[in-house]
Image (cartoon, rainbow, N blue to C red):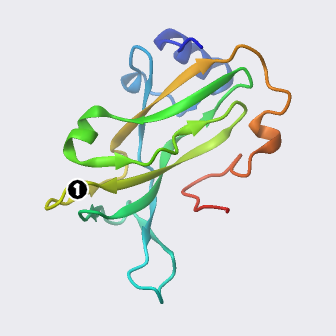
Amino acid sequence: MPTIVDHQIRQLSRDMGLIEPFDAEQLNPASYDVRIGETIFTEGTSPASPRWMPWNLLEKPYVLRPGEFILAHTVEIVRVPNNMEAVFQLKSSRGREGYEHALAGYIDAGFTGQVTLEISNINRFHTLPINFGMRIGQLRFMKLDDIPHRPYSLTGRYNNDMGVVASKG
């Protein structure tokens, strides 16, 4: 399946809102940089605490400790057409700093919403900042050979979700 390129990403964003808001500064030759949104979920600190605790990055940046795992979301809303799929990949510079993204970066044909990200710090000794608007990864879009009979817009539990969303089981 061919990956679409910069001018195709730009045109689809103009024509059907593939990425919103769209910023040409975030456009790469065959991908689009995405940024961390305003809210993250941090893991509860004890078995008695809630599983996820919200943290507002607009009020205060977060410091990700070594080995810590959080959920975040993209600023960008993504509208994947029924004839395409997308994949989230961590930016290589972020990987070199010690950020890691869990292998849950597939975005199905027909998905609409903000993408939830599973981020951890794989450093042994150093913390990492999590800031609103930081470029964390990129989306690649690929054309499908055919249009699915049942796109994600009909079957997906996370379709039209906005903000960070924990597992729905």
Residue under the point 51% across and 40% down: 105
Q: Quadrant of the N terminus?
A: top right
Q: Position of residue 128 (x, y in %)?
A: 22, 56
As shown in the figure, which amino acid type bears the numbered disc 1?
Leu
Q: Residue pushed farthest bottom?
A: 48
Q: Position of residue 36 (x, y in %)?
A: 41, 48
Picture layout, residue 51 above or below residue 12: below
Q: Position of residue 2 (x, y in %)?
A: 56, 11
Residue under the point 46% across and 13% down: 6
The crowding category of the residue bearing disc 1, from other C-alpha atoms within 10 Å (few below 14, some 14 to 19, many at least 20), is some
Residue under the point 31% across and 65% down: 60
Q: Residue pushed farthest left?
A: 125
In what element is the residue under mark 1?
strand
Q: Quadrant of the C terminus?
A: bottom right
Determine which quarter of the picture holds residue 150.
top right
**In the rendered image, is residue 18 in sight?**
no
Front-most of 39 and 118?
Answer: 118
Q: Position of residue 14 (x, y in %)?
A: 60, 19
The residue pinned by badge 1 equals 128
In the shown orientation, is residue 127 left or right of residue 141? left
Front-most of 35 and 119?
Answer: 119
**In the rendered image, is residue 36 in sight?**
yes
Determine which quarter of the picture holds residue 4.
top right
Front-most of 40 and 124?
Answer: 124
